[in-house]
Image (cartoon, rainbow, N blue to C red):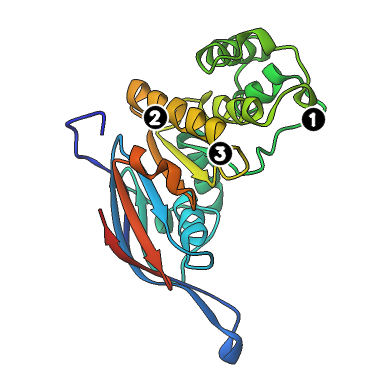
Amino acid sequence: MNSENHDIAVSCRSIEKSFGNNENRVWALRGVDLDINVGEFFMLVGPSGCGKTTLLSIIAGVLTQDSGDCSLFDNNYAKMSENQRIEFRGKNIGFIFQQYNLLPSLSVVLNVAVPLIINGTPRKQAIEAAKELLEEVGLGDRCEHGISQLSGGQQQRVAIARALVHEPKLLLCDEPTSALDHDTGVKIVELMQDLNRRKATTFVIVTHDNRIFPYASRIAHMDDGKIEYIE
């Protein structure tokens, strides 16, 4: 961790989530309890289908649990309207995906600026902020390039900059290194950890990639919809 502050960023209590009905019902989460501290570099690991991504989606506020409570920075999703939830997510959460989800029709700098522009930041100011962050992730000289001109590792750096540009309190990452070769994956997670330390942003990372486990502040091991143990 990068701080002595043990305030809670994410609090999950008795989270249950199922899909389907009656005899077709499948339980994805079976009573998950979890606290993640502000400033942690926290990983959720376990076999495919164990509930990691479902839990991440509930923390993100894009899935609603069947029962239990999920709060981010003392804000309970259950007490928010849909519009309040969308606004809260837009201001406080950033996302990094396995497949980058960049917009090929836009330049690198515009891809990074998009979250600010959506949140109402004037275009010129948004582009300046995007350029500063691209410098931080080592792509200051690629601002006007197209996405197709970048390597996989460079595209993931753009995705990281885009996720951080609106200065979220929480960054949620779904398999951020699995599409990358070993050396590039290690460089990406080292970059993420450096940003975590310098910006005090809380990271929650779903991963199968055991190469990056040593970078975690703590690791929650999941299986069959439950957290088996945390180390």
Q: Position of residue 79 (x, y in %)?
A: 40, 56
Q: Position of residue 85 (x, y in %)?
A: 50, 48
User: Residue at horizontal 30%, vertical 34%?
Assistant: 39
Relative to 210, residue 92 above or below: above
**Label 1 close to label 2 by CB (< 8 Å):** no
Residue beneath disc 3: 96
3D distance between C-alphas at marks 1 and 2: 27 Å
User: Residue at horizontal 65%, vertical 37%?
Assistant: 100
Q: Residue furthest left?
A: 4
Using residue 40 as the reference point, say whether residue 62 is left or right of it.
Answer: right
Relative to 57, residue 124 above or below: above
Q: Which mark is residue 104?
A: 1
Q: Position of residue 125 (x, y in %)?
A: 60, 10
- Examine the image and state in which quarter residue 134 appears: top right
Q: Quadrant of the N terminus?
A: top left
Q: Which mark is residue 193?
A: 2
User: Residue at horizontal 54%, vertical 41%?
Assistant: 176
Q: Position of residue 184 (x, y in %)?
A: 56, 30
3D distance between C-alphas at marks 3 and 1: 17 Å
Using residue 80 as the reference point, say whether residue 98 is left or right of it.
Answer: right
Q: Which mark is residue 202?
A: none
**Label 3 close to label 1 by CB (< 8 Å):** no
Counting residues from the start of the chain, the first of labels 2 and 3 encountered is: 3
Q: Amino acid at mark 2?
A: Gln
- Confirm whether residue 117 shows in the render: no
Q: Amino acid at mark 1?
A: Pro
